[in-house]
Amino acid sequence: MSTTELDNLQLNEAVQRYFEVLYMCDLSIFDKLFHPACHLFTVTDGAASVLSLAAYRDILEKRASPKSQGAAREETVLGVQALTQDIAMVQVRVRVATKVFRDHLHFIRSKGQWYLASKLYTLEQSA
């Protein structure tokens, strides 16, 4: 799905806010974007791990932001799948300092606002 299709769902702004959270570690944006029940999932060396929203927020709060380190921004929307006008999955690739992640972001829209409901991610590259 193209950026135009993201715009048609009015989802582009939420995806851009996600990129801002990762680049700036801005918790005020984080708190408005992530659904309170959101969890983050990955598999490392065959073992699944799950982060609660509170644990992920704590990580971002303690992390020196890529922006503060003068790191270049690299972020790409790889695809979008809409289940309905109010439920969608967005696949992105994003650099966070020296690491490149591929994320599947599951969004829901409630009362006109898009929220990140869950995140599945993998580390693609670490420099």
Image (cartoon, rainbow, N blue to C red):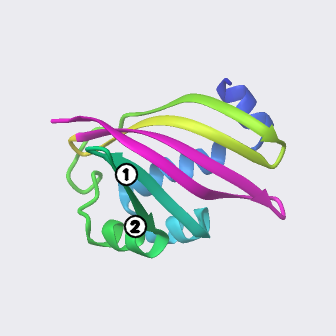
Horizontal arrangement in the rendering, residue 63 relative to residue 13 (left or right): left
**Location of residue 113 in the rendering, given as x and y in whole percent from the top left corner:** 75, 60
Most extreme residue toward the front is: 46
- Closer to the N terminus: mark 1 or mark 2? 1
The residue carrying mark 1 is 23
Q: Is residue 124 above or below residue 46?
A: above
The residue carrying mark 2 is 56
Point 38% across, 72% down: residue: 55
**Location of residue 11 in the rendering, given as x and y in whole percent from the top left corner:** 70, 44
The magenta stretch spans which residues?
99-127
Q: Is residue 97 above or below residue 58?
A: above
Q: Badges 1 and 2: C-beta atoms under 8 Å apart? A: no
| Magenta-colored stretch includes residue 121 | yes
**For the stretch drawn in magenta, what is the main secondary structure?**
strand
Point 34% across, 66% down: residue: 60
Label 1 – label 2 distance at C-alpha = 15 Å
* Disc 2, SS: helix
How many numbered discs, if any?
2
* Disc 1, SS: helix
Instruction: Say which of 7 and 54 sits in front.
Output: 54
Identity, as a three-letter code, of the amino acid under mark 1: Tyr
Point 28% across, 58% down: residue: 65
Instruction: Locate residue 49: give its quadrant.
Output: bottom left
Identity, as a three-letter code, of the amino acid under mark 2: Tyr
Instruction: Say which of 108 and 6 sits in front.
Output: 108
User: Which corner quadrant holds the C terminus?
Assistant: top left
Point 47% across, 41% down: residue: 103
